[in-house]
Image (cartoon, coloured by chain):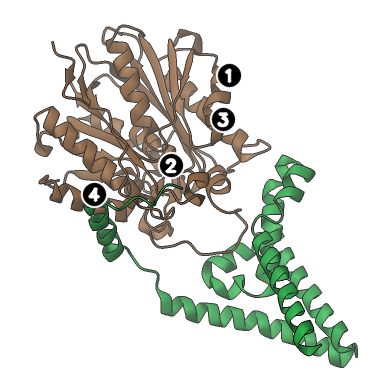
């Protein structure tokens, strides 16, 4: 069987299964439309820790532990941990991995991390290099604001294209197809995926990240459809990570230019996680946005049989405050994973 | 130095599209809110001035100092209580431009970086936002002072 199609797309010979998911979110996410789906909603965004950074790594660790607990597993039974976050030196993932003590490969794909980890984890399992892989991603509104923007107590207005970083940690447990132990999900398999290219159409506005990422999402989708020789209608739903309302609009526009009709199958996690009444401008963003939406909501719906084929495409704005100050634009990336119900 | 790269037609087209379709700020209501809140803050300042002039019978320098001290104190306190950012989210420039906004821009990073310690956190980060205002404000005053000195002899 040919495992590679074209330059970017992979298909798995023995598709790994997503056995369980774990999610922890902050209070604002808990008040959103998906509030009842999350495993744990924090009332205090420091979760009893001294700093937001410490709280975020605790969220990462506990999201992984929750996913494992659903399969009655402990960290030593896991072969590999793949994950990342938005902070410099991916400190959240590094410090959480220290606590979990699972062999660890740290990832930085900005908000595309959840798809990146699932794609890599599936490839490693299909390649025979691991049997059980935990994939996780987090973001925290307060840590992201202080690293990328302004102090929280500073009074000012956001622009209408701004998005709110999701406070949330999501983890998935991938297992080799032969696994027969306890599991939350029995029917969800990762059957393939497309590795994204970095695409940059010169957007420099750090409060318009949806527009910066949309070209990458359209590029990855086009590559996937071309290389896999399939069409949008082969999927029940095409989910992007955090394009938000305006980014989704631009994504549809770019797809139209490429001759792709999204046929009302496109959904965006950034639009799902908050309701417009929550005053979050264009929606949610951050690694945690797609991670918690996938693990808490989309996988459950898939397991129930609401859809059988999903293209999960998390999008990342590879923004750097330093590069931005030096006049660089914001490159985007999007990775796609094909999830099928079998 | 490397010359600035030319935009490709695709980039140009996309940036144009984004510009056209982008949701816009509602400028008129925002200006009205800024006017009301900014005006209100100035009225409070004026009341403090009147109090200094009439009740405390201070000289003009004393009145100016009193007003600045009271307004900065109010801005800093409201920042510490977590109220000023909410006013700012509603009023925009109305609460940023007055001296209370200046206090907010110094106190908010000082609070935020307390966890990194009093020296490398609070003290080092305190002027990250207000710093440029101070540098160019003081710089401009020096230039203006020199010109005045030269022209007025």
Callout 4 and callout 3 share a chain: yes
Q: Up-down: is B64 above or below B138?
A: below
The numbered dot on residue A251 is 4
Extreme residue in the bottom direction: B54
Q: Earlier in the sequence, mark 3 or mark 2?
A: 3
Image position, residue B117 (x, y; %): 76, 41
Q: Earlier in the sequence, mark 1 or mark 3?
A: 3
- Which residue is under mark 3? A91
Kindly indicate whether the residues beneath marks 2 and 4 are on one polypeptide chain. Answer: yes
Near-viewer residue (A202 or B126): A202
Tell me if A205 is positioned left or right of A49 in this view. left
Q: Nearer the viewer, residue A218 or A16?
A: A218
**Callout 1 secondary element:** helix
* Residue indicated by mark 1: A98
Label 4: which secondary element: helix
Q: Is residue A8 above or below residue A250?
A: above
Q: Are marks 4 and 3 in contact (CB under 8 Å)?
A: no
Q: Secondary structure at mark 2?
A: loop
| Callout 3 touching callout 2 (CB < 8 Å) | no
Mark toward the start of the polypeptide (1 vs 2) = 1
Q: Are marks 3 and 2 on the same chain?
A: yes
Residue at mark 1 to residue at mark 2: CA–CA distance: 23 Å
Quarter in which the C terminus of chain A is drawn: top left
> Whole-percent x and y of residue B23?
33, 65
């Amino acid at each position: 069987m040919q495992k590679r199609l074209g330059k970017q797309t992979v298909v798995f010979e023995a598709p790994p299964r997503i056995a369980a998911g774990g999610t922890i979110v902050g209070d604002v996410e808990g008040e959103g439309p998906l509030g009842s789906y999350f495993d744990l909603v924090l009332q205090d965004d420091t979760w009893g820790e001294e700093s937001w950074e410490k709280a975020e790594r605790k969220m990462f660790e506990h999201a992984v532990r929750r996913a494992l607990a659903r399969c009655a597993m402990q960290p030593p039974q896991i072969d590999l941990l793949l994950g990342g976050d938005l902070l410099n030196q991916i400190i959240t993932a590094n410090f959480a991995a220290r606590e979990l003590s699972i062999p660890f490969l740290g990832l930085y794909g900005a908000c595309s991390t959840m798809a990146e980890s699932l794609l890599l984890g599936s490839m490693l399992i299909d390649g025979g290099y691991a049997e059980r892989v935990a994939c996780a991603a987090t973001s925290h509104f307060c840590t992201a604001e202080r690293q990328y923007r302004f102090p929280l107590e500073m009074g000012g207005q956001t622009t209408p294209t701004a998005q709110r970083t999701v406070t949330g940690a999501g983890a998935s447990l991938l297992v080799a197809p032969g696994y027969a132990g306890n599991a939350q999900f029995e029917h969800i398999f990762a059957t393939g995926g497309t590795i994204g290219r970095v695409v940059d159409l010169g957007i420099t506005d750090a409060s318009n990240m949806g527009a910066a990422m949309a070209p990458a999402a359209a590029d990855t989708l086009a590559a996937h459809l071309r290389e896999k020789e399939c069409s949008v209608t082969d999927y029940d739903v095409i989910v992007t990570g955090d394009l938000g309302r305006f980014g989704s609009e631009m994504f549809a526009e770019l797809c139209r230019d490429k001759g792709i009709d999204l046929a009302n199958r496109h959904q965006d996690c950034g639009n799902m996680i908050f309701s417009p009444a929550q005053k979050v401008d264009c929606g949610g963003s951050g690694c945690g946005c797609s991670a918690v939406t996938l693990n808490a909501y989309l996988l459950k719906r898939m397991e129930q049989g609401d859809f059988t084929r999903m293209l999960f495409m998390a999008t990342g704005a590879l923004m750097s405050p330093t590069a931005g100050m030096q006049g660089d634009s914001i490159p985007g990336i999007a990775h796609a994973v094909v999830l099928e119900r079998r | 130095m490397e010359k600035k790269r030319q935009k490709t037609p695709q980039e140009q087209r996309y940036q144009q599209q984004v510009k056209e379709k982008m949701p816009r700020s509602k400028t008129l209501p925002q200006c009205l809110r800024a006017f009301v809140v900014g005006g209100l803050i100035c009225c409070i300042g004026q009341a403090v001035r009147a109090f200094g002039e009439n009740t405390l019978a201070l000289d003009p320098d004393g009145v100016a100092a009193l007003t600045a001290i009271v307004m900065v104190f109010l801005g800093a306190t409201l920042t510490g209580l977590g109220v000023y950012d909410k006013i700012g989210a509603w009023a925009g420039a109305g609460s940023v431009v007055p001296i209370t906004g200046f206090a907010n821009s110094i106190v908010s990073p000082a609070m935020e970086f307390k966890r990194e310690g009093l020296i490398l956190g609070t003290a080092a980060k305190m002027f990250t936002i207000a710093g440029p205002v101070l540098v160019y404000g003081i710089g401009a005053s020096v230039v203006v002072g020199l010109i005045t000195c030269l022209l007025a002899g």
